[in-house]
Amino acid sequence: MRLILMSFLTLDGVYQGPGSPDEDRSDGFERGGWLVPFVDAAFEEQATAWTAIATAFLFGHRTYDAFAAVWPTITDPADRNAAQLNSRPKFVVATTPVEQSWTPVTVIDRDLESQVSALKASGDGELQVHGSGRLGRTLLAAGLVDELRLVTAPVILGQGRRLFGDTAGPLGFQLLSSQTTPAGLQLCRYGFKGAAGAGAYVRGVTDRAFETAAGGS
């Protein structure tokens, strides 16, 4: 399976508390609900389409608890997100006891990198990580993420937990697709390429090389 990291972000990389002011006030966070003013039909349609192709889900403990408190209560068969989340296999990374009534669920409590690697090798499809920013940073640092799906709101919060942190080396991604919703959200898919490249820009040389590579004259 390919590992897909999906996250809602602000322009300064904050993922904490997108859905309401009271969603996650940990660490003194007081600026939640920032995604809500930008939610529209185009966003809902794309988010549902992404979730619909999941083979399984991987969560951090905090996100799993939040999802497990809500999604099992949604039983409308017409709700495709609920149908996927409630029926597909779920894996939760946790070192403390987990409420396991939201089935089917498996707890990963040790050897995270090796167990996630084994999951990826176990079949086809997508192993999707929703939210779970701390877990996402760990997976990125370990080079286990195959694709990022980021929904970016045109907001700078200046406070809150951020998705991107230190890695052993710079990571390179390729833009696979992008769209802007009428309300202003940027929805992008990035495929992992490996180590990021670098260079020095030389006016009159670098831009000419770019034109040649792009087929210019």
Image: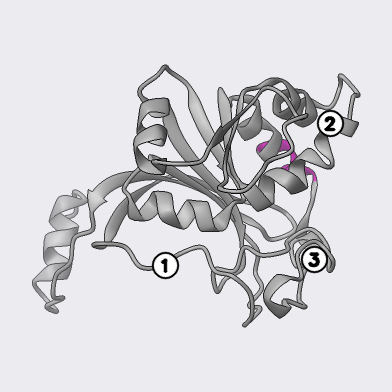
Inspect the image, locate mark 3, and give the three-letter code of the amino acid beneath it: Gly
Placement of 75 over or under 48, stated as above or below: above
Comes first in the chain, label 3 or label 2: 3
Inspect the image, locate mark 2, and give the three-letter code of the amino acid beneath it: Pro
Q: Secondary structure at mark 3?
A: loop
- In percent of width and height, residue 187 lies at 58, 50
Q: Residue furthest left?
A: 205
Q: Residue furthest bottom?
A: 158
Comes first in the chain, label 2 or label 1: 2
The residue to which callout 2 is attached is: 72
The span shown in magenta is 41-46
- In percent of width and height, residue 162 lies at 54, 68
Inspect the image, locate mark 1, and give the three-letter code of the amino acid beneath it: Gly
User: How much space separates mark 3 and mark 2, taking CA atoms?
Assistant: 23 Å
Q: Quadrant of residue 9?
A: bottom right
Residue at x-position 8% and y-position 71%: 205
Left/right placement of residue 204 relative to residue 142 reads left
